[in-house]
Image (cartoon, rainbow, N blue to C red):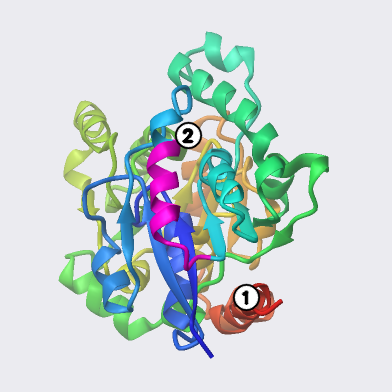
Amino acid sequence: MATTRVLQVFTVMNRGGAESMIMNYYRSIDKNKVQFDFLVHRKERAAFDDEIESLGGKIYRMNPISPFFPGAYYNELRKFFEEHKEYTIVHSHLNTFSCFPLKIAKEFNIPCRIAHAHIAIEPIRLKDVLSNSESLKETFKKLVKFQLKKKIHKYSTHSFSCGEKAGKWLFKEKTAFTIMNNAIDAKAFAYDSIVSDTYKKEHDLENKLVIGHVGRFTSQKNHSYILKIFNQLVQKKEDSVLVFIGDGPLRAKIEEEAKSLSIDDKIRFLGVRTDIPQLYQMLDVFVFPSFYEGLPVTLIEAQAAGLKVFASDRITREVHLTKDIEFLPITISPEVWADKILEKISEEKANNFDIVKNKGYDIQKNTEIFQDFYLKQTHK
């Protein structure tokens, strides 16, 4: 039986939530039966590219999509599908922008065209614009996305989502959708006291309260608010350290803000890392005050690692798997977050592997479901 090749469509294969999710599935899937190739929209190499190629995947690079002038992109994609007739499944992870590649996939009669929802964007609120808590640029981006999502159902044959909230946002009442859990290798993230002690020692974090965040430096993740929380925390507990894992366009801005608050000497910017499961082990608390999300895989990972998690109340409660997570408003004083953190630090870390597995977020069972779906599309 020939191997089914699935074309996964992303912006760029860096360590974001959706990208990490699909790589979890890719590592676990039977590559004698199903192989992933990737269509990306950046010319530069990305964090996962080497691993993709080592697993037998191909990476095709396109120019970025211009939502206002998509003609050149459409022509580029038409040429691609003329040259690559082997794909019968196109799985797009571009959220609202999925309408662009799926439109041309439909034009080429590709029988399985999947739109996958990964975020649920909060509505535009006039008070956010007037108070400058949301920039005009961000508001304009939202307006474009709200318009584009109306077209998704025209071009897709299947609708997937990381959770209920993201699916309802992207597809609304027009389309039923299937939830594909943002599953992880829960065993790799399970709390390990030996790894925790080793990593704390290597990073000079022994006998310190370690606050952590994993995510790209973009406006969505609300890093400025994390700094405000941490600024309050160090005034109450001086031996606290903040660890940022990830990179992105706003990193330099956040570094400058840290300096202006005179807390930069207590912050570690670790950048993009490959040892994420081990890094979780050296954290004590995980903070995640995003403006919006879908179902963030980082919160699954953090709970699997037994961390005390404090997340924005704008995030779906579907991610509430253990007793270790608490949701707080991002409209309240950062001092409240700091106080909540201090209330929890005396609690020991738990091994949450069984909880994460039993609630459907371990990768092995989910991969079987994913793989069976792909194979059924090929052999209809």
Residue 115: tell me if it is visible.
yes
Q: Amino acid at mark 2?
A: Pro
Residue 256 placement (x, y as % from top left)? 20, 29
Q: Quadrant of residue 38?
A: bottom left
Q: List x then y, in percent, for residue 228.
A: 39, 33
Find disc 2 in the rendering and name its residue.
334
User: Does residue 269 lie above or below 329 as drawn?
Assistant: below
Residue at which label 1 appears: 378
The quarter of the picture where the N terminus appears is: bottom right
What residue do we see at 64% from left, 65% from top? 180
Q: Residue at x 55, y 24 (%)?
A: 144
Type of secondary structure dominating the magenta stretch = helix
Left/right of residue 224 with respect to residue 291 in the rendered view: left
Q: Where is residue 331 drawn, in percent x and y?
A: 57, 28
Q: Amino acid at mark 1?
A: Thr
Viewer-side label of 2, 1: 1
Q: In this rendering, is residue 123 above or below 235?
A: above
At x 27% / y 68%, what residue is drawn?
274
Which image quarter: residue 19?
bottom left
Answer with mark 2 or mark 1, whichever residue precedes in sequence: 2
- Magenta extent: 74-87
Secondary element at image label 2: helix
Q: Is residue 213 above or below residue 257?
A: below
Q: Is residue 301 left or right of residue 55?
A: right
Image quarter hosting the C terminus? bottom right
